[in-house]
Image (cartoon, rainbow, N blue to C red):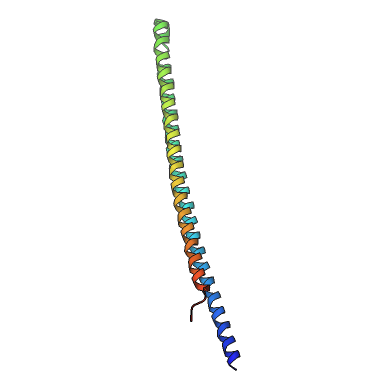
Amino acid sequence: MATTKKADEMYAQCTGNAVEALALWADANQKVLRELVDLSASTAKEGVRLYADLQSSAVEAVKGGQDLLLRWQGELGEIQKDPVAWYQKNLLDGLEAAQNAFKLLEGNAQAITHSAERLQASAEQAGKEIQQTFASLGTKVKTLYTPSAN
């Protein structure tokens, strides 16, 4: 009878430990999933921010190109009056437009770099949180299955 009672107690203890371990794993999985969802959300947010920056830069570039073409079109009458001066002026305008285009490209490169840095920081933070979650889980499961000194 004592052996049966002791076996029942041991079975109940093992079952309780297993249930508690499953609860710990479920909690850890929930934390990891939350971190991954937060990382996905911040990645999507960063993607939208980068897209908006690149799109506004593209709109600015198109507007600058259109302004230059309209200015050249309006000055077509000046070709007949002084072709050398017209050529010189439009050459300078073209160089200025190229310079502006390179500035926009540089701005785009910087925006992409900053975006990648923010994504890297988010991923590192999520990785640290996930690592801490599993370290904590390991400690809790270890203490759960460590025999007590009775």
Q: What residue is rendered at 50% in x and 55% in y?
A: 36
Q: How many marks?
A: 0
Depth check: 70 or 40 in front? Answer: 40
Q: Residue at x 41, y 32 (%)?
A: 107
143 vs 37, nearest the viewer: 143
Report the quarter where the N terminus lies: bottom right
In the image, residue 124 sits, relative to residue 134, either above or below, namely above
Q: Is residue 33 above or below residue 71?
A: below
- Percent across and percent down for residue 32 are 50, 60
Q: Residue at x 46, y 41 (%)?
A: 116
Q: Is residue 75 visible?
A: no
> Looking at the image, which residue is at 53% across and 67% down?
25
Residue 90, percent from left and from top: 41, 14
Depth order, front residue of 42/138: 138
Most foreground residue, 72 or 42:
42
The residue furthest front is 149
The quadrant in which residue 84 appears is: top left
**Residue 2 visible within the image:** yes
Asked if residue 23 lies left or right of residue 70, the reply is: right
Look at the picture and state if 97 lies above or below 5: above
Picture coordinates of residue 134 (x, y %)?
A: 50, 61
Pinpoint residue 5: horizontal percent, then vertical percent.
57, 90
Describe residue 60's horizontal placement relative to residue 146 as left or right.
Answer: left
